Image (spheres, grey):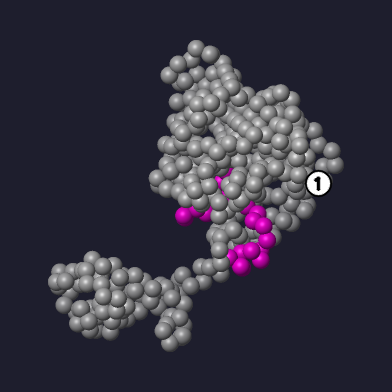
Amino acid sequence: MGQCRLGGFMRLELANFRFSRVPMIEGARAFLPLDGGNSEVSLGSRLKNRILKRLLDLVTDDAQPNLNALNDIVKNVRILELNMKAFGYDLGRKMAAALPVNAETQAHFVGLDSKASTQSDIESQWVAHWAAQLKTAIVYHRKLWELTYVLQAIYENGHMTSGKRGLGFGCGAEPIPSYLAAQGVQVTASDEAAASAEAAGWASSNQHLGSSPIPFQSHLIDKETFEQFVSIRTVDMNNIPGDLRGYDFCWSICALEHLGSIDAGLRFIENSLDTLSPGGLAIHTLEMNVENDGPTIDNWLTVLYQKKHIEKFARHMAEKGHEVAPLNFDFGEHPMDQFIDLPPWHYDPKTDHAKKLGNPIHLKIAIDGFISTSFGIIIRKSANRNLTD
């Protein structure tokens, strides 16, 4: 290793954290474990990691507080995160408790847009109705919004009736298959193979069928009726089997952002239309980066869509003769629309403090530094049986 790489002597003064002036090689070795590494690249990489560790550790090797400026900035981040979660969750619970009690609710037409989850939706009559149907409390949580959004779209497009056929992708242990079966709808509930779900991080968050033997919800339907109306399939969403055809509707809930890339998720939405009869309905929810300008996450375990991706895709669907429900990019302006939840998440390991806060309450979350919320898109397949690509 020559002087052009680190210089003849090392004197690192990063945020007032000083390493002793020592000869270059000896200085490097002073901060590295003696594990026999002799590669210059390895040495430099290990040195950087050791320096960063010293900058970020809460205490020094002598168990004294680490007083460098960088550590002063970051050492309280975890505590700030927990404080934000505690106040946000408390606000959400108190607001939910103050909502009027709807003893009786009725399904009704609202004309759903393709839209983001908002506080106004959670406080609406249509969410209250489907929450009651699912026998769950109203909470300010985007997962409740997603479930009720899918059910409302199915209902107001005329598919919540006996004899209809529905196909669910990435169903996990969600209650929709059980609820639809109780209405006499024939359901195919599918999910990725367990190994694929584990790799994508679904299994660890209990979003995969592997976390439950079947998506059977005993409070919504008896086992005999469930088995009569629901079939279970393992389906690769990047390669939908050709025998899944002739359905009246299909849906997925925050699954397509785990398919490897933004383009892969959009291809899935388009390919899901092949499973439908002419005029059939597709309802899909996805992770939406609320900031359209600037970067987003792609080619990763979880990708984040932006307004520009959805607008371009909607134009593509229109060119193919399909009808996309009007796009609505209003992300809300109420308190729970402004609260952005932060890690750690309650299903992550070593999150005892987060678990003490109780079940999450949020409509927006931070994902790798970006603000994300759930966005639903509704597409009616062209009724033209002769439509070709």
Please give the name of the residue rendered at 61% of the width and 64% of the height, measured from the top-left corner: 354
Label 1 environment density (alpha carbons within 10 Å; few <14, some 14–19, many ≥20): few
Q: Nearer the viewer, residue 174 or 22?
A: 174
Do we see residue 351 in this rendering?
yes
- Verify whether residue 373 appears in magenta: yes
What secondary structure is marked by label 1?
loop
Indicate the amino acid at tag 1.
Answer: Pro
* Magenta highlight range: 351-375
In-image side of 189 versus 62 (left or right): right
Residue 42 occupies quadrant: bottom left
Do we see residue 289 in this rendering?
no
Residue 204 location in percent, x, y? 55, 55
List the single residue furthest toward the right.
Answer: 103
- Verify whether residue 216 appears in magenta: no
Residue 141 location in percent, x, y? 65, 49
List the single residue furthest toward the bottom.
Answer: 62
List the single residue furthest toward the top.
Answer: 386
Please give the name of the residue rendered at 56% of the width and 69% of the height, measured from the top-left corner: 79
In-image side of 140 versus 28 (left or right): right
Please give the name of the residue rendered at 40% of the width and 78% of the height, measured from the top-left corner: 68
Q: Quadrant of the C terminus?
A: top left
Residue 267 location in percent, x, y? 45, 32
Q: Nearer the viewer, residue 247 or 48?
A: 247
Q: Quadrant of the N terminus?
A: bottom left
Residue 47 location in percent, x, y? 29, 72
Residue position for label 1: 100
Question: Compared to 281, does 296 lie above or below?
Answer: below
Please give the name of the residue rendered at 43% of the width and 43% of the height, measured from the top-left corner: 260
